[in-house]
Image: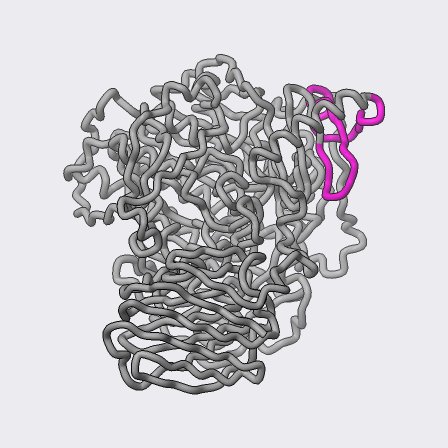
Amino acid sequence: MFPFFAAFRSSFRILAIVFPAVAVLSLQISCAVAVAADRPNIIVVLADDMGYSDIGCYGGEINTPNLNGLAEGGLRFTQFYNTGRCCPTRACLLSGLYPHQAGIGWMTTDRGHDGYRGDLNNSSRTIAEVLRPAGYSTYGVGKWHVTKHVQPDGPKHNWPLQRGFEKFYGTITGAGSFYDPGTLTRGNQNISPFADPEYQPEQYYYTDAISDHAVRFIDEHCAGNSDSDKPFFLYVAYTAAHWPMHALEKDIAKYKGKYDGGYSPTHAARAKRVVELGLIDESIDEAPLIGKWDQVEHKAWESRCMEVYAAMVDNMDQGIGRIVGSLKKHDQFDNTLILFMQDNGGCQEGNGRQGDFKRPVEASLPKIAADTIRLDVVPKQNRAGVPTLTGPGVMPGPEDTYIAYGLNWANVSNTPFREYKHFVHEGGISTPLIAHWPKGIKRHGELERQPGHLIDIAATCVAVSGAEYPVDILTARPGVEPDKPFGTLIDITPLEGVSLAPAFSGKSLDRPQPIFWEHEGNRAIRDGKWKLVAKENRPWELYDMSKDRTEMHDLADKMPDLVKQLDETWTAWAKRANVLPLGMWRGPKKNAAYNKKQKDFSFKPGADISREAGPFVQGRAIQIQANLKSTGDGVIVAQGGEADGYSLYIKDGRLTFTSRIRSKVTTVASQEKVAAGEAIIELTLAKNGDVTIEGAGVKATGATPGPMAVQPIDGLQVGSDTGGPVGLYKAPFEFQGELNFVQVHVK
């Protein structure tokens, strides 16, 4: 444990309770009531897929007067870091842990290892979960992206309202249309933007919706109700400027022709400006420009991509201005800590940059009703039936397009650094950090050169709020843990970061440990002025960051002893932080050590078996016998999740079997309801796909496409389905009868 946090370690236990969001009336009354100990409101703003030099106060030409104003009145960090990717960054920011410790070392899919479960784990606590018991109101808007469960009828234990937030408006998944975003959610309910009685703008645009709801939550909080004497924590997670390049024409018009000269003029101007601003020393060599404008075939299209990108950032800045305006209206601006940062470097991904741009643009597909809930990340069409257009020649911006701005513009966004999103060289992990708090930060317009990291944000929030960081948490899982009726005590992983508050007054951060990274096998350690960094399966590179922030002069061969020392330090961290073995982000290997030899299994109620240890069902027939002391609704046994798997359960009194093969769902259910009392339930899934289920006085037969096509990613559970729901129920759908045991035979 870091010494700084010793004061925040409590000896008490807290019970995990989901607090319902409370609706409040919006009254135009000032929220000038002083809070206990004058604790600040805290607003954390996170932008998506943006480079180091995109915003004006970090060297960019994009119009960001509101962010520039916060920088002039506050503090800019020159060496602040993210994790290099979207959902690991969010897990890291929210929890104050390295992403692997929080369970999201890669993306939101389960890769069969605790560091890569794709779901925020119970050993982590979000900022909202820590600040709320300390008397803060907690609100979230925008992109969530820290859970694999995005289905409206699936588990919601890792949705915002279950992780400490009182109110939430945003998307559960990681990307989508800005005009019709998938997984749009208010509270715990998925909604359509076109059938939402609470918010009906003249034109729906997601960035505006995020900003508008942030303002709404502030206004409602300051309405003179019972919460108005509390400080608040507001998490604002924009999807701008993540692909697709969607922007309003009024914003695009500001940048018409601005990028017609290509990559070089913008790159050169930014490289000069970052030096003028003092962000980079003029003696440091800038990373080279990659793109060659004279080789670009579709120049008008390419420049339009950057015009739209700039417009997306511009619109976000406008929204931040409205948030600031709301704070000022309610006399809360001076005592609000605002932190602005980005989730990774500029995005080189080429989504939508290939395709047949000659496709017709008129409606040619069935319309989608206004109240239909959309879950798609890459929509095939809009609601009017117009196919989604991609490729050179399709000018990005409108809702029927889906295009990224590409590698060459990402290289410009990351000026003066090299590499991009995914990587842990500076171009992938360097982010602006603007800290603004008139009552708490006296350094106005200054630069802070001490390195910081996302792990420090939660620590900072804990420090300035006076909250206590919990030691452990009591979780109750009735039915899953029948021998522990009062729940299970889970140790909370201590915070990894340090508070940035000392820097607010020009003091040292006194960081006791280096800063670490791993993403997709790309790895790094920053210890003082030294940075050791490598791409996956490549040797270490060593850089002196005081003289070579752009990583242009590798010193590894000249300083092998230092490389060895830093390598050993990184490895020790990787072992304790659930990073190893390297390569787990790819998921289990095809020749993984599955339990292929064992044919017969016996499980007790509450069993939770891993993918590797469970029955190997790929291509095999399955026989199940469940011994029930009493019947009732709920899952008897489930193996797998939303893509592949099977589940035997009772729903509405009917004995039911559901299989998922490559997301294709087949269900067989009895017509009659099961009899009460003791029962033996038997299931047979033959290799030809035929299904027979019988017991408790009922029988049903049917057919599925066949046995499991692959070994399901999720493991096997008895008495509930705690992973992605296999069956047609809301997980975990715990069994309400009493199970003696379940036997599974594969052949």
The foreground one among 387 and 491 is 491
Residue 273 showing in the rendered view: no
- The picture places residue 150, in percent across and down from the top left corner, at 43, 59
Residue 631 showing in the rendered view: yes
Q: Main secondary structure of the magenta part?
A: loop
Instruction: Tell me which residue sits at (66%, 50%) in the image.
Output: 348
Judge from the rendering whether residue 83 lies leftward or rightward of residue 145; answer left or right: right
Q: Does residue 3 belong to the magenta stretch?
A: no
Farthest residue, direction right: 557
Instruction: Tell me which residue sits at (38%, 38%) in the image.
Output: 490
Q: Does residue 551 belong to the magenta stretch?
A: yes
The foreground one among 489 and 381 is 489
Q: Is residue 470 above or below residue 710?
A: above
- The picture places residue 580, in percent across and down from the top left corner, at 63, 41
Judge from the rendering whether residue 39 lies leftward or rightward of residue 295; answer left or right: left
Q: Is residue 99 above or below residue 669?
A: above
Judge from the rendering whether residue 22 lies leftward or rightward of residue 206; answer left or right: left
Q: Which residues are magenta?
A: 533-558
- Locate the C terminus by quadrant: bottom right
Q: Is residue 358 above or below residue 123?
A: below
Instruction: Tell me which residue sits at (69%, 22%) in the image.
Output: 530
- The picture places residue 695, in percent across and down from the top left corner, at 35, 80
